[in-house]
Amino acid sequence: MEITKKKNLLFEGKHERPIVTDIFFQEDKKPKPVIIFCHGYKGFKDWGGWEKMAERFAEDGYFFVKFNFSHNGTNKDNPTEFLDIEAFGDNNYTKELDDLQSVIDSLLLPDFTYAQNLDVSSINLIGHSRGGGIAIIKASEEKRITKLITFASVADFGSRFPKEDILEKWQEKGVRYITNSRTGQQLPHHYQFYTNFQENEERLNIKNAAEKLEIPHLIVHGSNDTSVSIADSGQLFEWSPAPKLLLVENADHVFGMKHPWNEAELPKEFKYVLDNTLEFIKADNQELLDAYGD
């Protein structure tokens, strides 16, 4: 059956900017398990092979959702370009958690346009890199999520902030700039990013969130990841009550992909990730809890 794609739908969020969202599904009026994908830092929903990933899951009978965080620097007219760099500078972790909650809530409204295509008893959350950390925290808070999958996830937010002199300089200037290696742009981080973390440090502790999980957690990491250490996956495995660890030999942070991805096929490393992710999602929850739980 042909896949229905609805691109750049506008979901309302809590922070005065729409959440630009894509959905992929087979329009057969049958309820389907839901998969929601969260992109990472300096990422966006249409990066690299995420579109082909969405198609793959939809072909396998899932209702797949991917979205741009409201303050990731893109906008509804330019969902793949960082043209709203002030919005990027105003982003923070709690806004991303709010955005993800808004997406979940929007999908589960009784009057959601495609509600009859959703099986709301099966909501699976996937997060890549920083989006993995967001997904872990949300999965610990939101009891409607039934399975968690993290791709190359960070295990800690706090350690990624600058220290001492650089932190003081950031506070003095109110902004520091990060180079986007793909585009060469200088992207701002306003100091509120750090103060927001400090004010919400307990909630934003990934270790605490992972230890509170009550659902199966598939932890995927590439052995050649130079952006997020493979040690992070080991920490997540240690903390999560029902974890399964999938280490992908010779895979980098994006499992062999790049942007744009114009190839007909996904790289073999990412195909392997998707095959294992599908197997994990299809498996019975209780069996996974029994197999991987303490």
Image (cartoon, helix red, strand yellow):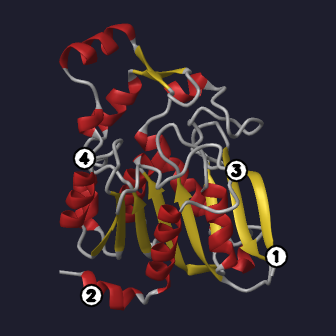
Residue 140 appears in the figure: no
- Mark 2 lies on a secondary structure that is helix
- Mark 4 lies on a secondary structure that is loop
Q: Amino acid at mark 3?
A: Asn
Q: Amino acid at mark 1?
A: Glu
**Residues at marks 4 and 1 touching, judged by CB atoms closer than 8 Å:** no
Q: CA distance from mark 4 to mark 1?
A: 45 Å
**Residues at marks 3 and 1 touching, judged by CB atoms closer than 8 Å:** no
Q: Of tags 3 and 1, which is closer to the observer?
A: 3
- Mark 1 lies on a secondary structure that is loop
Quadrant in which the N terminus is drawn: bottom right
Answer with mark 2 or mark 1, whichever residue precedes in sequence: 1
Expressed as whole percent of the image width and height from the top left, the position of residue 45 reads 62, 49
Q: CA distance from mark 4 to mark 3?
A: 42 Å
Q: Please give the residue where the numbered disc 1 appears in the rendered image.
A: 2
Q: Of tags 3 and 2, which is closer to the observer?
A: 3
Q: Please give the residue where the numbered disc 3 appears in the rendered image.
A: 262
Answer with mark 3 or mark 2, whichever residue precedes in sequence: 3
Q: Please give the residue where the numbered disc 2 appears in the rendered image.
A: 291
Q: Of tags 2 and 4, which is closer to the observer?
A: 2
Q: Looking at the rendered structure, which numbered label has been put on residue 202?
A: 4
* Mark 4, other Cα within 10 Å: few <14 / some 14–19 / many ≥20: few
* Mark 1, other Cα within 10 Å: few <14 / some 14–19 / many ≥20: few
Q: Residue at x 70, y 40 (%)?
A: 79
Q: Amino acid at mark 2?
A: Ala
Q: CA distance from mark 2 to mark 1?
A: 36 Å
Q: CA distance from mark 2 to mark 4?
A: 30 Å
Choose top left, top right, bottom left or bottom right for residue 94: top left
